Image (spheres, rainbow, N blue to C red):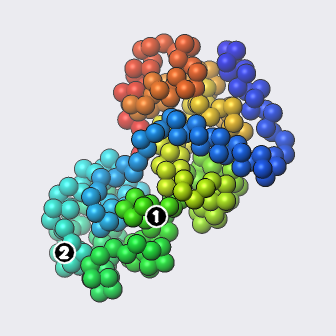
């Protein structure tokens, strides 16, 4: 075990005891500052230009990668530019256009229902309030927060699988229910940070803190993470697990660049992040 890995393990071990509420708040916000440095340009990885396009893309993203959704939506948005177009769509044709996103029959029904509801209740426009959004076909609380935060600049916490996994792994909450997770994290982080927090946590989950094998030994949050050691802790081994174009910066921030061969960094940077 390298000295760096040993020091990080020792640091993580000091957090195994009870943590005060104030200590948790301070640790969570310290981790957020690190994530902000790591992902200054974090953003919604679904392509869209209007609230309607974002709503449609988010519905399609269920059990599907953002990359695949972004391959489907250009033609979809061109053919169905308004809510009325979805409401009056030929279902068979719509299903065929979105087939590659999976669960296409249910998604087509949601898109047509969404279009009809928007035409009937909101003159074809997507509303900008949570209480209204969650009553629309195909839109739950998670989707509503994505729309509010990214199309209307209304702060919201998006609890997807990455977000829930990471905040539990970090010891920010033990809650499993997404709504309870949202409320618990909202008490730790200032409201103005909620939308960007969501993006940064999701970015980190896709690039470093993977579900089955997190890159613990190449993680800039290691010193504050009570789950350090769940994945490989040797820097050279962990670095191979980091994904995406941010890899060189992430490894530099984690302080492991000198312990990782340059070829490994290049290979990791070339990997697409898991959506």
Relative to 10, 42 lies left or right: left
- For disc 2, the neighbor class at 10 Å (few under 14, some 14 to 19, many from 20) is some
Relative to 31, 135 lies left or right: left
The residue drawn where x is 50% and y is 35% is 38
Q: Is residue 26 above or below residue 155?
A: above
Image spot of residue 108 (x, y percent):
29, 70
Image quarter of the C terminus = top left
The residue drawn where x is 58% and y is 26% is 254
Q: Would you say residue 159 is visible in this rendering?
A: no
The mark that comes first in sequence, 2 or 1, is 2
Question: Element at badge 1?
Answer: loop
Residue under label 1: 154
Disc 2/disc 1 C-alpha distance (Å): 27 Å
Residue 147 image-quadrant placement: bottom left
Relative to 146, 114 lies left or right: left
Residue with the most extreme right position? 18
Image spot of residue 114 (x, y percent):
32, 76
Residue 111 image-quadrant placement: bottom left
Relative to 150, 193 lies left or right: right
Image quarter of the N terminus = top right
Q: Would you say residue 153 is visible in this rendering?
A: yes
Total tally of numbered discs in the picture: 2
Residue under label 2: 85
Residue with the most extreme left position? 79
Image spot of residue 34 (x, y percent):
58, 36
Image spot of residue 100 (x, y percent):
27, 55
Question: Element at badge 2?
Answer: helix
The residue drawn where x is 68% and y is 21% is 5
């Amino acid at each position: 075990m390298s000295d760096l890995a040993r020091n990080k393990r020792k640091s993580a071990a000091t957090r195994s005891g009870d943590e005060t509420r104030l200590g948790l708040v301070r640790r969570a916000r310290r981790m957020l500052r690190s994530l902000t440095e790591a992902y200054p340009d974090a953003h919604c990885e679904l392509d869209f230009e209007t609230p309607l396009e974002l709503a449609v893309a988010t519905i399609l993203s269920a059990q599907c990668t953002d990359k695949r959704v972004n391959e489907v939506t250009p033609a979809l948005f061109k053919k169905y530019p308004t809510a009325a177009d979805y409401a009056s769509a030929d279902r068979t044709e719509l299903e065929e256009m979105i087939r590659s996103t999976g669960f296409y029959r249910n998604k087509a029904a949601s898109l047509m229902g969404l279009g009809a509801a928007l035409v009937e209740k909101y003159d074809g426009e997507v509303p900008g309030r949570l209480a209204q959004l969650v009553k629309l076909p195909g839109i739950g609380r998670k989707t509503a927060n994505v729309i509010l935060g990214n199309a209307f600049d209304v702060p919201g916490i998006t609890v997807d699988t990455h977000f829930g996994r990471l905040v539990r792994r970090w010891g920010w909450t033990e809650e499993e229910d997404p709504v309870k997770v949202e409320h618990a994290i909202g008490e730790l982080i200032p409201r103005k940070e909620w939308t960007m927090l969501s993006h940064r946590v999701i970015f980190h989950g896709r690039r470093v803190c993977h579900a089955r094998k997190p890159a613990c030994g190449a993680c800039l949050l290691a010193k504050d993470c009570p789950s350090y050691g769940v994945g490989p802790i040797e820097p050279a081994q962990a670095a191979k697990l980091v994904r995406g174009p941010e890899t060189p910066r992430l490894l530099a921030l984690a302080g492991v660049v000198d312990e990782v061969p340059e070829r490994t960094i290049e290979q990791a940077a070339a990997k697409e992040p898991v959506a």
